[in-house]
Image: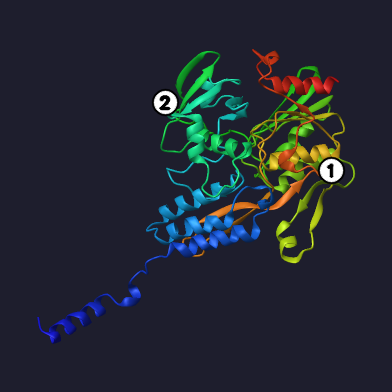
Amino acid sequence: MTLKKITAFSLLLLLLFPLTSLKPIPNYGSDFLEFWTDVHDNYAYFDKKHCDWDKVKTVYLPLAEKAHTENELITLMEQALEELYDNHFSLNTNLKSSTRLAPTGLDLWAEWVDGKAVVTEVRKGFSADKVGIRCGMEISSINGIPVEEAVKKRIGKCITNTDTEVKNYALRQLLAGTYLQERVLGVKQGDKTNTVNLDKAAGNLTDKQQHATLLDSRILDQNIGYIRVNNSLGETDLIPLFDKALEQLRNTTALVIDLRDTPSGGNSIVARGIMSRFIQTEMPYQKHVLPNEEKLSGIKRSWLELVSPRGPFTYVKPVVILVDHWTGSMGEGITVGFDALGRATTVGTRMAGLNGAINGFSTTQAKIPYSFPTEQLYHINGTAREQYTPTKLVDLNNTSYNGMDDPILTEGLKAIKH
């Protein structure tokens, strides 16, 4: 082919496929750097994390620059965010290979006790409960790998100190599992070890959870009212339903508010809508701190958030709030708020321990959304929300609860009587 013919052929190609129509090859490194910078500038809990965030950029940015697909970028961002071992930090998108969110996608709670991975709570009615996992059991392996080894492999590359919080985070990430793989646990009780497939019969039931109503209410024995919130603290429609339930329970001698199924959190409008029915004057219920402003200016910024009375009447009888490890984020905020207002006795295990208030971000090119804590939250007495302990702390591994259907409710009713 002559040079003239090659040139004519090239011109024909340009006419048929102009350069402006060619889709540019994405550089996912710019997305990752944007993600890293957002976290660097706004994350509120660096002061308590054993993470070298500068090293995160050194380790993961070159990998992102070599990524060919958005899925590869998402996987790298998931790995990077786990370096902060913070369950309130998540991508708002996922893959089949992604780990389920904890505590929403978790059906058993375990932690390291005296060097062992011990089950300290089981989510009633979900897969772990249905296959016979019980409090006090020791987890010896996860998907065929000894638990110590599995946890060690899960810990990030940029963590400078592997303390108990780091190990507990890795353990619960492994127990939540991915959407691709069934969870097979080796569990010990006494001298006996069994292998249990949590998902073989019906899959992970946290993936399928649905509620027919936003809340349930009824009257218990001795004219005690009961309201259970069904993981709906982000639904403003919950407010009129709560008002209606409270009207029906107006003449009860006390009230139990059950927040043990609020792992997905919610918003402060709903929280204030609930708390406002139990006070007669405007009062503070939580403290906010914005660390980024102090980092930039050297001047600390903090403020108290108030809740104001609302509704046709104030419920003034005794109130008990029930909580457990599936009381998350705004559920924790309501619990701490009721305590700060002096309007309830809180009863249950420690809660999910989710850090602060989150804000949403997104990368510019690939539009990958992510959310993480940008504000620290505190009880008005100065206790960090994630460190709050219920007034009546219930240890479900206590043998006195053996055979008891609902120890936390039982202790809540006792608290009312006393």
Residue type highlighted by circle 2: Lys
Q: Residues within 10 Å of mark 2 (few under 14, many from 20)?
A: few
Badge 1 marks a residue whose secondary structure is: loop
Badge 2 marks a residue whose secondary structure is: loop
Does the image show residue 34? yes
Q: How many marks?
A: 2
Task: Name which residue lies at 51% across and 31% down.
Answer: 148
Relative to 192, is 331 on the left or the right?
A: right
Does the image show residue 362? no
Task: Name which residue lies at 59% across and 27% down.
Answer: 115
Q: How is the image coloured?
A: rainbow
147 or 125: nearer the eye? 147
Work out whether 163 lies above or below 322.
Answer: below
Residue marked by disc 1: 381
Q: How crowded is mark 1: few (under 14 residues within 10 Å), some or many (20 or more)?
A: few
Task: Name which residue lies at 74% across and 42% down.
Answer: 385
The image quadrant that residue 214 belongs to is top right
Location of residue 287 in the rendering, given as x and y in whole percent from the top left corner = 79, 49
**Mark linked to residue 200:** 2
116 or 346: nearer the eye? 116
Dot in front, 1 or 2:
1
